[in-house]
Amino acid sequence: MCMPRMTGSCACGAIGLQAEGLSRRLSVCWCEPCRRWQGLCGMGIGARAADVKVSGPVRIWRSSEIGERAFCAECSSSLWFRARNGTGLIELTPGLFVNACDAVLDHENFCERRPPGLCFIGRQRQLTAADYAAQAPVTGPPAASAEDPRAGGCACGAIRFRVDWAESRSGACHCRTCQQWSGGVFVAVTVRQEELHVTGAEHLLHWQSSARAERVSCRLCGSKLWYRRTLPPDNPARGDPGDHAICLGVFDVMEGHPLTSEIFIDMKPSGYALAGDHVRQSGPEAMRHRGQ
Ligand SMILES: [Zn+2]
Ligand SMILES: [Zn+2]
Ligand SMILES: [Zn+2]
C-alpha cells in the first residue's frame, strides 16, 4: 500500500517539503544541542531522506562530528536532524506539518535533563543518557556545566546573552508559526529589552514574522532565541513593545521557570500535550487578552 504524501513548510514559506512514509511516532530529546536549537526540546518524526523532497534555501549546521541540522536560511525554522551514520534516516521536525502529521509522542531521550515544571503527559518511554548511549551508535553530548541561571546562548556558541531579570514562569504557544519556527513547541520567558545584554549580535538573524513582531535566531546554527513585539499591542497593559519572549531552551539553566500558561491550545497537535493545571486559551481568547 502506498503511504500518503505529506506536504509541509517552514514558517516563512520559503522551504517546502514533500514526504512519504513518515513515521507516526514522535520523539522528544532534552539533550543540549536539541533544546537550544529548537528552543525547548528536540522533536522529531522519522523518515528516509530519500523519501523527502525539499525546495528552498536550506542551511546546514554541523552540530557534531556525526550530526547535522538543517534550517531555513530566511526564517531559521528547524527542518531536520540527520546522523551521518549511513542509515539514510532523518528526523523531520513535526512543526513543519499540520497536526504534526498525526504523529503521537512515543519516547523522550535524555529525560533526566528535562526541567522540573515542564512535562509531557502520557506513558511514553523515558530514556536516560545512559539508555541512549546503550542503544545508539554514538553517545550524546555532555550536560551543560554552566550554573548561571541568567546566562544563555545558541547551540554553536556564537551568540551569548545575559539577563538582569527574567520572569520566574514560562508560557507556551501552539500557533502554527510557533510550531513551524521551533519545529515543535514554543515555550518562552519574558525579559524586558533593557535587561537583555547580547554578545555576538552580528550573528543574529531577524525575521519579521508578522506586522507587529519579529523572531530572532542564530544565523550560523539556527538556534531559536526570542520573539519580540516591534509595535505596541492595542492593549498596552498586556506588555510593552521591546519585551523579549526568550526561548526557555537557550538558557544555560532551564530550571526555575515552571509552565503557567498555554495559548493557541486549539491549534496544538493531538499527539502530545503538556501537563499541569494552568491557564489554557484558544487563539481567539489569547488575541482578545493580548490585543495582538
Ligand atoms: Zn523559512
Ligand atoms: Zn549559533
Ligand atoms: Zn505562537
Image (cartoon, grey):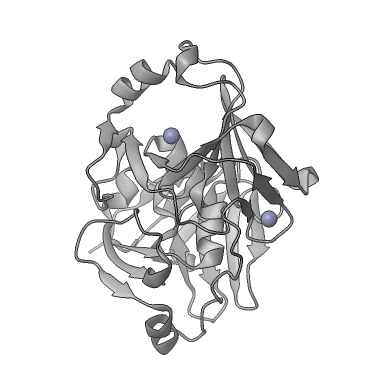
User: In the figure, 156 relative to 198: above or below?
Assistant: below
At x 33% / y 37%, what residue is drawn? Answer: 261
Query: Is 75 left, or right, of 49 in this rendering?
Result: right
| Relative image position of residue 217 (x, y in whole percent) | 63, 45
Is residue 218 visible in the rendered image? The answer is no
Closer-to-camera residue (262/105): 262
Q: Position of residue 61 (x, y in %)?
A: 66, 62
Q: Residue furthest bottom?
A: 134
Quadrant containing the C terminus in the rendered view: top left
Residue 71 location, x and y as percent?
A: 59, 52
Q: Is residue 199 above or below residue 192?
A: below
Residue at the spot x=55%, y=44% of the render? 15
Q: Is residue 88 left or right of residue 205?
A: left
Displayed-image quarter of ligand 3? top left
Q: Residue furthest top?
A: 234
* Residue in view at x 31 percent, y 21 percent: 284
Q: Quadrant of the N terminus?
A: bottom left
- Give the image quarter of residue 263: top left
Question: How many numbered callouts?
Answer: 0
Identify which residue, 205 or 129, lies in the foreground.
129
Is residue 114 visible in this depiction of the protein?
A: yes
Closer to us: 140 or 261: 261
Q: Name the image quarter holding residue 105.
A: bottom left
Q: Position of residue 289 (x, y in %)?
A: 36, 18
Q: Residue at x 74, y 56 (%)?
A: 158
Q: Nearer the viewer, residue 98 or 112?
A: 112
